[in-house]
Amino acid sequence: MPRIRPVPAVVLTSLLLLALTAGLAALLRGDAGRGAFLGGYLGAWALFVAAVVTLRSAPARAVVPLVVAGAVAVAAVGLVAGPRTSTDSYRYAWDGRVQAAGISPYDHAPADPELRPLRDAWLFPGAAVCERGGAELAPLGDGGCTRINRPAVHTVYPPVAEGWFLLVHVLSPADARHKGLQTGAALLALAVTGVLVAALRRRGDPRRAALWAWCPAVPVEAVDNAHVDVLAVLFSVAALLVVNRHRLTGGVLLGLAIASKLLPAVLLPGALSGVRRPRTALAVLAGAGVTVGALYLPYVLLSRSSVLGYLGGYAQEEGYDDAGAGGRYVLLRLVLPDSWAPPVAALALAAVAVAVWWRGDPERPWRGALVTTGTAFLLLTPGYSWYALLLIALVALDGRGEWLGVAVAGAVAYLLGGDAATAAYAVAAALPAGAAWVRWRARARPDRRPVRPPRPLPVRRGRAPQ
């Protein structure tokens, strides 16, 4: 592909970023339904890809300013409206408020009458609002309603997440509502960008940081919806960047990530890439395990109920234990009976984890982490698009953009579901599979064209020297 000249490349990249931010702002401030929202979101992804491609032709001195300026602009877009496609941040705000009152968030569901004194008109609207109804409102047993989803069940979030909710509650003005969580999430997203830029710059080229910094999922899922996943992403990226040099520190950071959102547990095989010595592996595993246990311990001591909250019910609700009950394992269910899908997925994940651990590159633990995480998404086919924030950060670290299709598939599954989700995940699986096949062919069959010997130099005819 021909490269764009340096100065036009900077201008074109800037214009594409301007179009991206303007489009996302209009999308978040609008009232489009799920299908129309998905159409606008996919358009934002197209602009994002074009901006990343043009960045390749930008001069080296302009790359970091472009990436950072674009990151600030894209993150700021997420602040223009209230949560657009998720109500999870309302639960975050409630858990922070409950903890500020000296109550364990694991002991009571939001609908519990004992917590009635903590209710306000924002999270628990009045009768007039409840009568009008709305997709973001959940009914209560007493005839009222709340913006908190699943109000009859206990919280599912781990201790670092709960600590984050409390911190945001304490630091936010009394009338901040969702803005405190969104602002905090924007700062976390920019912190991830900063870590990526610094790490990739040391390795020679920070362009890949744009794969996170400019990705439409960051303003939509991390900032606008304020998902706590972005906190787990920050700890995960930091862990993978240091674990090959400082095993215990990497394990502790990975433990913080797991205690923010349990999903980063899938990074463990990647963190152990190429590790053969039991003592070295133990440093990572013990660092992560002890950290998670130590962070849960205060809540265990202060809570009367289980600190796992609704975790088991959530897994059952989402169909992870029974493939026929939901939209999970959709690719496996195309070729296998429903009842076979969960055990086959577990076996496949275990095989990939062992392969990554045994044959992974210890100098690039994020590469194995990307493979295990991406494979887990393709086998389990989760229906929540914000889970892919972790995957996007891993793509930025490793540069294998073919895995970004999984993030797009998650958005299709969340907003449309059904056959559209199956098709989207099938395309997402084909992209890394095709890229892997191309790389394998390049290694297995190098260029065998015959090399022509150089032409002999012409011999000058003349008298021999005397």
Image (tube, rainbow, N blue to C red):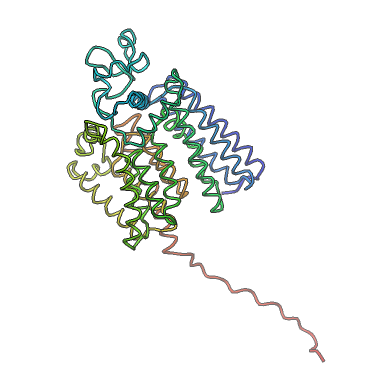
Residue pictured at 26% horizontal, 30% vertical = 106
Question: What residue occupies the far top of the structure in this picture?
Answer: 128
Residue pictured at 35% horizontal, 48% vertical = 267
Q: Which of 96 and 383 is in front in this view?
A: 96
Residue 46 makes an appearance in the image: yes
Picture coordinates of residue 359 (x, y %)?
36, 60
Picture coordinates of residue 380 (x, y %)?
28, 42
Residue 86 makes an appearance in the image: no
For the C terminus, the image quarter is bottom right
Residue pictured at 35% horizontal, 53% vertical = 284
Q: Nearer the viewer, residue 365 or 385?
A: 365
Q: How many labels does the image show?
A: 0
The quarter of the picture where residue 127 lies is top left
Picture coordinates of residue 69 (x, y %)?
58, 36
Above or below residue 358? Residue 315 is above
Picture coordinates of residue 316 (x, y %)?
21, 34
The quarter of the picture where residue 63 lies is top right
Above or below residue 394? Residue 214 is above
Q: Which of 84 and 76 is in front in this view?
A: 76
Question: What residue occupies the far right of the structure in this picture?
Answer: 466
Question: What residue occupies the far left of the structure in this picture?
Answer: 339
The answer to whether 217 appears left or right of 118 in the picture is right
Above or below residue 206? Residue 421 is above
Above or below residue 145? Residue 394 is below
Q: Nearer the viewer, residue 95 or 388?
A: 95
The answer to whether 173 appears left or right of 267 in the picture is right
